[in-house]
Amino acid sequence: MSNPCFQYTWLEMSTLGWVVIITTIAGVGGTGLGGAVGAILKRDSSKVVSLLLSFAGGVMLSVVCFDLVPSGLMPDGADSAVSVWVVVAGIVIGYGVIFILNYWIDKTTNHEVKHISKNHPKTADNLDELIHENHFKEHQQENKANDTPVSRYQLFLAGMVMAAAIALHNLPEGMVIGATYAKDSSNLLGGSGLVIAIVIGLHNIPEGMAVAVPLIAGGMKKPKAVLLTAISGAPTILGAIIGFQLGLLSPVWLSLSLSFASGAMLYVVFGELLPEAILMFRSKLPALFILIGLLTGLVLVNI
């Protein structure tokens, strides 16, 4: 006898298909677009990237606070509210998983670049750092001082490491999309599911740049680097399928999935997007765009 947990109705199979398509656009498309941008972007675009990250962070925070966490406390199909400690546990796990993956990425790549001082921010404070163009400049300076040719192997290796790291990083991000659609699959092309997919797609753009820039600097052809960068976003699809399936198992599993998604997004907002945005453009505008994103997310999840 087959497991009833995985006996989807035609509607559920159709929904899962749409979730896969939407996640592919957000994951593979967003990361690949970032790779393409990394190949052509002018290096004076820090302000634009800062405001984009600020807006995306505001939307993510709004969706977490006004949609995912309330839905985790009272998931569809539950006879009563789920214990707040279940939601807290899910948030802590989601936050912790993304924190560990990002810590590994930073530890693997940042040791190659000598920062100005011990007081230098531990996150990117300009576009070159965000997309790891500083790795290439560091190797250029070292090799020029030693009167040796520019080492491309180290840059290529750094790009491959980043591709693998981003691929692992994208798995829980996909679970965010899948869990959100498991909560409400009645509005495939609207509601919080689509909002989350769009914002994660925007968030994947600088990640794609972080993969493509060192690959190209390491000697890889631009089209091949962009293709490899896009492929690194493919695990988002697997994550979406896992998140969607877990969300359908029971109200408690749906609550855990939504809580995990909330924790993952909270780390992305407070550990990545906002620190990078504020350091890259030290003015009042990032705060304004955070507010605009917050209000935009509030409107989108309630229409």
Image (cartoon, grey):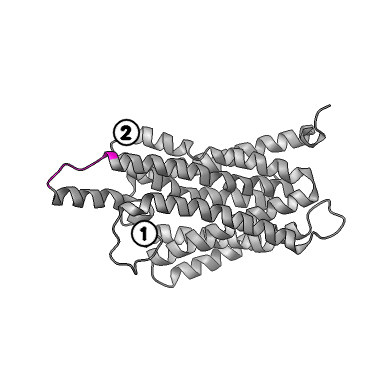
User: Residue 150 lies in magenta, yes or no?
Assistant: yes
Specify the quadrant that holds the N terminus. Answer: top right
Q: Is residue 162 left or right of residue 191?
A: left
Q: Is residue 79 left or right of residue 176?
A: right
What residue is shown at x 50% (from left), y 61% (from top)?
A: 271
Q: Name the kind of residue labelled 1 in the image.
A: Ser
Q: Position of residue 188 (x, y in %)?
A: 69, 44
Q: Is residue 184 visible?
A: no
The answer to whether residue 277 is above or below residue 255 is below
Q: Is residue 18 left or right of residue 142?
A: right
Specify the quadrant that holds the C terminus. Answer: bottom right
Q: Pointer 2 and pointer 1: residues touching (CB < 8 Å)?
A: no
Which mark is drawn over residue 301?
none
What residue is shown at x 57% (from left), y 48% (from top)?
A: 173
Q: Secondary structure at mark 2?
A: loop
Specify the principal SS of the magenta part: loop
Q: Which residue is mark 2?
A: 221
Counting other residues with Cα less than 10 Å from the Cα at mark 2, is it few (<14), some (14-19), or many (20 or more)? few
Q: Is residue 230 visible?
A: yes
Instruction: Give the quadrant of residue 26.
Output: top right
Q: Is residue 32 left or right of residue 176?
A: left
Give the Cα separation between the discs numbered 2 and 1: 25 Å
Q: Which residue is mark 1?
A: 46
What residue is shown at x 28% (from left), y 64% (from top)?
A: 116
> Extreme bottom residue here?
284
Q: Position of residue 298 (x, y in %)?
A: 64, 63
Instruction: Give the quadrant of residue 60.
Output: bottom right
Question: Which region of the structure is painted magenta?
Answer: 147-153
Q: Name the kind of residue labelled 2 in the image.
A: Lys
Q: Position of residue 169 (x, y in %)?
A: 52, 47
> In the rendered structure, which disc, 2 or 1, sits on the residue that comes first in sequence?
1
> Extreme top residue here?
1
